[in-house]
Amino acid sequence: MTKPKLWELSDEIQQLENAISAIADDETLSESERETKLQETFAQWLSTGESFKSKAEQTARYIRHQEALAEARKAEAKRIRELASQAENGANRLRKYLLDQMIRSDIKKIDGVAVKIGLRKKQPQVLLNVPAEELPAEYVQVSYKPDLTKIRKLLKVDAQGAIGWASLAESQDYSVTIR
């Protein structure tokens, strides 16, 4: 299936998008007010004019357009991240080269016109001679993270509700599939 172009979208969808953008950009509204206004605008749009089925199809086409736009933006962001990474790597290579040359030349400080360069000793790196499990307790940081997948499986099996330390949410989440 091909992705619809913006000019293929109906005028109604474009008007809806303009209304949504205006509400989203309104800085005087709180998040809850913004969400309420968005829901009201969409409900009003659905209840006027063409049939719900027609508007649902238009909305689905517009969703596809927005998803294609998001993918294009992600690809461009990835390209820019790669360029930034290349620039950072080049700067790091030059920094290491400068460091090596200053150490080799035994120069600790350079006062230039535009920049000042100085060597600074770092803290020595800690090398562990034993596995982390064998360290004394006062030198170890412990963190706990719940395994939500295992807990969800256990709660689905627990029909009597004997587990008091966790429960499944009562609400049902849905997603829309557009093919």
Image: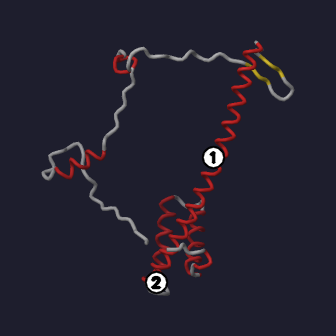
Q: Which residue is mark 1?
A: 82
179 relative to 114 in the view: left or right: left
Q: Is residue 179 above or below residue 27?
A: below
Residue, far bottom: 50
Q: Residues within 10 Å of mark 1 (few under 14, many from 20)?
A: few
Alpha carbon separation for disc pair 1 and 2: 42 Å
| Residue beneath the point at 39% across and 16% down | 130
Q: Earlier in the sequence, mark 1 or mark 2?
A: 2
**Residues marked 1 and 2 touching at CB (< 8 Å):** no
What's the residue type where badge 2 is placed? Ser
**Percent position of residue 26, x then y:** 60, 63
| Residue beneath the point at 30% across and 60% down | 171
24 relative to 131 in the view: left or right: right
What's the residue type where badge 1 is placed? Glu
10 relative to 57 in the view: left or right: right
**Percent position of residue 42, x then y:** 48, 74
Label 1 residue SS: helix
Mark drawn on residue 54: 2
Q: Is residue 165 above or below residue 144?
A: below
The figure's colour scheme reads secondary structure
**Percent position of residue 3, x then y:** 54, 72
